[in-house]
Image (tube, helix red, strand yellow):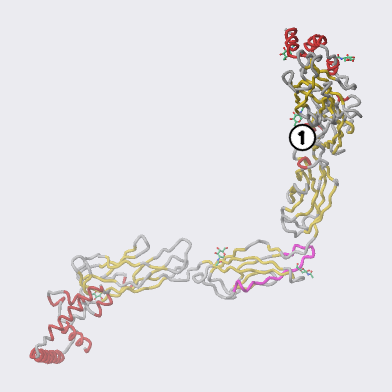
Amino acid sequence: MPERLAEMLLDLWTPFIILWITLPPCIDTAPMNQSQVLMSGSPLELNRLSEEQRILNRSKRGWVWNQMFVLEEFSGPEPILVGRLHTDLDPGSKKIKYILSGDGAGTIFQINDVTGDIHAIKRLDREEKAEYTLTAQAVDWETNKPLEPPSEFIIKVQDINDNAPEFLNGPYHATVPEMSILGTSVTNVTATDADDPVYGNSAKLVYSILEGQPYFSIEPETAIIKTALPNMDREAKEEYLVVIQAKDMGGHSGGLSGTTTLTVTLTDVNDNPPKFAQSLYHFSVPEDVVLGTAIGRVKANDQDIGENAQSSYDIIDGDGTALFEITSDAQAQDGIIRLRKPLDFETKKSYTLKVEAANVHIDPRFSGRGPFKDTATVKIVVEDADEPPVFSSPTYLLEVHENAALNSVIGQVTARDPDITSSPIRFSIDRHTDLERQFNINADDGKITLATPLDRELSVWHNITIIATEIRNHSQISRVPVAIKVLDVNDNAPEFASEYEAFLCENGKPGQVIQTVSAMDKDDPKNGHYFLYSLLPEMVNNPNFTIKKNEDNSLSILAKHNGFNRQKQEVYLLPIIISDSGNPPLSSTSTLTIRVCGCSNDGVVQSCNVEAYVLPIGLSMGALIAILACIILLLVIVVLFVTLRRHKNEPLIIKDDEDVRENIIRYDDEGGGEEDTEAFDIATLQNPDGINGFLPPLFSLIFMVMHRTS
Ligand SMILES: *[C@@H]1O[C@H](CO)[C@@H](O)[C@H](O)[C@H]1NC(C)=O
Ligand SMILES: *[C@@H]1O[C@H](CO)[C@@H](O)[C@H](O)[C@H]1NC(C)=O
Ligand SMILES: *[C@@H]1O[C@H](CO)[C@@H](O)[C@H](O)[C@H]1NC(C)=O
Ligand SMILES: *[C@@H]1O[C@H](CO)[C@@H](O)[C@H](O)[C@H]1NC(C)=O
Ligand SMILES: *[C@@H]1O[C@H](CO)[C@@H](O)[C@H](O)[C@H]1NC(C)=O
Ligand SMILES: *[C@@H]1O[C@H](CO)[C@@H](O)[C@H](O)[C@H]1NC(C)=O
């Protein structure tokens, strides 16, 4: 098979142009060795070449026959010979001329048309253009007629190591946690080399560290940078500068190199415990400081940073644990001691606290190094402050009976100056809270006395404010609220709850309830009201009425018999004694007025009018005759008047009647009450039958007049 290919190649090339390639003298790499073989231009040599080709094919890089090579960056005094074109046509008969065309023909590459020598007349750069495609042809010298078809070939520019490695992304920054184990990977860097990566070692890079040892190492091939020392301490040195070199030619001498810098920063881990700057802190605080006030700050330093330096502060012991608290200030990383409960210089003048600072974020890897906490002692001295008087109680509640005597002592407030120089106190009443000057206070002993009489029924509470003032400094003032409650005393007698008006039906049965009354009492006994009702002693055996107490503290008045008659007695007065259950009890007599009225069968009061028909008793016969005469006279006048009006066709009476009816209708519409019935008795007008109910208004009027005159 290889033989066959070689034959094919020979078949293809031998009739035409044979390439004769010169090579630069300085190249000693393997492919160049092959070119040396090609230097022989005879067909015989080519047979041998086919054998070489077979060997070459096995190597990484293909070797093509129609290629020539020229070294880049060559600059000699003479143009460099790239190769020679040669045809094996019989040159005897005709003169042959070689023609070159294609990339750079004539400008970069020149051909000697007689000898077929190709020269590069310019300096070439592989990194700019790696190969040129050209066409060669043999023509007749005279006729310029092509003697054979044109053949294409390539001139390759051969690489020399003219580019140094470059770190395109440098300078680099990387971080690695402090205290990392040896060989912890930090980062990797990459350099690039513009030279031919496939051909030769011009782009074969090897990395090394120029600066930064013994802390870091680099893997020569992969450029992975690792820690070369264990347990590097950030707190000792945080930043390292590493200089890295990349060298081509596999690192051999003569290669080109490039360098870059890598800054490695160690990141923090919590490998340091907090430590109080002082083991003893002293603070002082006035006793009257407001609760929550910061008294002082303690700080435990931590060489770590960020959250690894965070500590929480606690009070773990001491005699002031109940009075003080400590809060952690995450920003300032210190602890603030604050007051939680009021201080009293006179009770205790100093406190000792044991405070602890403990790291919040513990790294379990280092917890074996001991506790990540520290303690310190805090001494707090309480300073005396000039304090206002203090009352024995924050509020007072006093109770006094409403009948308490004037100037009697209701109660007492006490206050003292808490300071060592205990000043005497004077008391006074804030008059804004006692505008009526109901009370007085003894300025020395705080006893409150009654200045004006009390009345619970007027005001139950008297809430006043008492002021205590230090005699030595009138600016030292305290106030205390005193609520004085007035207690009830039975000083009001019960009475009817309202003005009752009772009616008694003439046709009522014995035992009928005429009226139910209830009583009220302005006092407010503890167990509620309980009233006792009774008739006057001389009326206990009243033949007409009796009373009966109901469960709900009210009283029913009952008629004892029937047959009450308006004409006999129109109104009965029934005095009733009401007593309360006080100690001593109080009582009053209220009189109930009972009117006798005419009622319907179902007991609805219809008329209590008595003047309508009652003839005054004891009128003399003469008087009666006089009255009758008057009536007759009036009748005559009326009759005369009527007849006179009739003559004028004006029915006056009928009109009057109409007026009356109008009155009735209007009255009904408005639904008048009892007061109205007195002025205008509707029952009298409405009842059509009998003298009992009905009399024309004119007669009513006459009778009323008579009654009045008598
Ligand atoms: C290349 O040629 C040189 C001598 O010219 C020789 O020493 C070397 O072994 C040859 N290399 C190969 C790969 O044939
Ligand atoms: C050379 O290699 C090519 C492709 O790899 C193959 O086609 C050819 O047959 C090989 N020639 C010889 C002489 O081995
Ligand atoms: C080098 O680092 C890059 C990213 O920074 C990573 O993708 C690459 O795998 C690393 N190379 C090696 C050899 O570790
Ligand atoms: C009196 O008390 C006031 C208020 O506490 C204080 O400011 C002042 O200094 C005191 N005066 C004297 C003489 O102690
Ligand atoms: C007075 O004080 C008492 C007890 O604090 C309270 O119940 C009452 O409502 C107060 N009265 C007035 C008028 O402020
Ligand atoms: C009882 O009624 C009669 C007449 O109806 C009267 O005369 C008498 O005075 C009344 N008695 C009392 C105690 O009211």
Answer few, some or many: residues within 10 Å of disc 1's Cα (few below 14, many 20 plus, some between 14 and 19).
some
Q: Secondary structure at mark 1?
A: loop
Q: Residue 594, position in %: x, y? A: 28, 73
Q: Is residue 206 above or below residue 686?
A: above
Q: Quadrant of the C terminus?
A: bottom left
**Percent position (x, y) of residue 398?**
59, 65
Query: Does the magenta segment cover residue 423?
Result: yes
- The residue closer to the viewer here, 403 or 546, is 403
| Residue occupying the point 57% across, 73% down | 405
Viewer-proximal residue among 265 and 30: 30
Camera-side residue of 411 and 161: 161
Tell me what residue is drawn at x 84 percent, y 21 percent.
115
The N terminus, quarter of image: top right
Q: Residue, x 85% and y 48% (percent of image)?
A: 280
Where residue 441 sits, quadrant-wise, is bottom right
Query: Which is more toward the observer, 468 or 23?
Result: 23
Ligand 1 located in image quadrant = top right
Q: Is mark 1 within 8 Å of ligand 3?
A: no
Residue 566 shown left or right of residue 399 in the figure: left
The correct choice, above or below, for 660 with respect to 193 in the image is below
Count the numbered circles shown: 1
Where is residue 164 drawn, in percent x and y? 85, 31
Label 1 amino acid?
Answer: Asp
Residue 509 at x, y percent in the picture: 21, 65
The residue located at (77%, 71%) in the rendering is 472
Image quarter for residue 576? Answer: bottom left
The answer to whether one can see residue 193 in this image is no
Residue 338 visible within the image: yes
| Residue at numbered disc 1 | 363
Region in magenta: 416-434
